[in-house]
Image: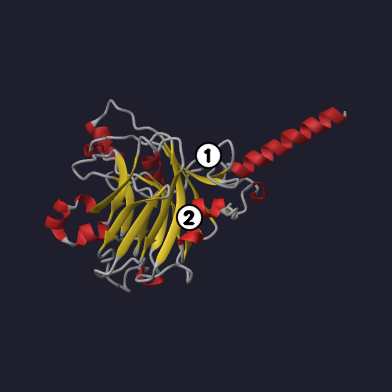
Amino acid sequence: MKKLLFTAAVVALGFVQTALAQPTDPNWPRSQWHDDMRYERSQGFTRDGWNGSGTKLPHQFNIVGAPHPVRYGTHSERFEIRATDDNAMRDLGVTGGNRSELTQRPSRNNLRIGEDAWFGWSFYHENLPSGLAHDHGWNPKLGQWKTDLDAPPIIEFSPVYDGRTEGTHIGINLNDLEVSRGREWSRANRFGYVCTLFSIRQSRNRWTDIVVNTNFADNENGYLRVWINGRLQCDYRGQIVVTPVDRFRSFGVRNQGPLFKRGYWSGHLGPDRWRTNYPSRPIPTFVVYYDEWRQGRSREEVDIRMIQAAGGAPVD
């Protein structure tokens, strides 16, 4: 009898741990979710302090634990996009593209345009393709800042298509500049490209630690530095923000500080171009993980390598 009770307790504990790690149904009791996990009708799956963007379907966003990859502590964020999600989203009237992102909510704690700002997080993937031609329509956003949710990203992490490294690396694009400066600048700086950061192929199945230092300047005094796994990979100087103040736009957030979006978004090109140009090549299911996202006033506050070495607390 004691053995049966012990076995039942172990099974129950395993169920609770699984539920905590990976909620799959918005009707699950919230007591079985991670403390930060939320489900809102207007937002979908999200977490405290963030809005969901395209996370309406249960598989699209979870806060997970082992056996999923975790950079530090006990949990990480898991984003999944399937080839059919764009159609499902259209049916829900949410979006016309494959998207699963968290969007930072406006806050007095957000860092402002012109201020020195530091950010850090870790990124993990298993199967992002390397070397796809741009006519696949595959140009995902894997982290982006916006001053207006209707405007182009001011800083974007996405595959590089600069004429030399066609979709083989993740780089930095300053799309606000690319859109505002016209065709000639766009030809010279395709998609606003300014820096190459890391290889898609070499980063598979391992955590990539990212640290960003910028002032989001709307003039030529701007700077953007990015460290990958402790090594400086980008040192850009110049304007970053162009989007003008427009108090009549419903999503205008410029004066509340740039908002960060993380997760996976296939871009406006979406999977339709892939299906049209390469009908015999199936679109994979893409899964990416994020962990230890932080913002602060110094590198010591956000660099996971420094924090881990000092025995600092994880962001769980």
Secondary structure under the numbered disc 2 in the rendered image: loop
Label 1 vs label 2, nearer the camera: 2
- Residue displayed at 41% across by 58% down: 260
**Residue 281 x/y as whole percent:** 30, 27
- In primary-sequence order, the first of circles 1 and 2 is 1
**Residue 179 x/y as whole percent:** 21, 58
Marks 1/2: CA–CA distance: 19 Å
- Residue displayed at 42% across by 68% down: 111
- Res. 167 image quadrant: top left
**Residue 205 x/y as whole percent:** 45, 35
The circle drawn on residue 25 is: none
Residue at the far top: name it: 280
- The residue identified by callout 2 is 303
- Residue displayed at 37% across by 32% down: 284
Using the image as rendered, state which of residue 278 and residue 224 is in the foreground. 224
- The residue identified by callout 1 is 69
Three-letter amino acid code at the position of disc 1: Pro
Q: Label 2 crowding class (10 Å Cα cut-off): few <14, some 14-19, many 20+?
A: many
Q: Where does the N terminus fall, quadrant-wise? A: top right
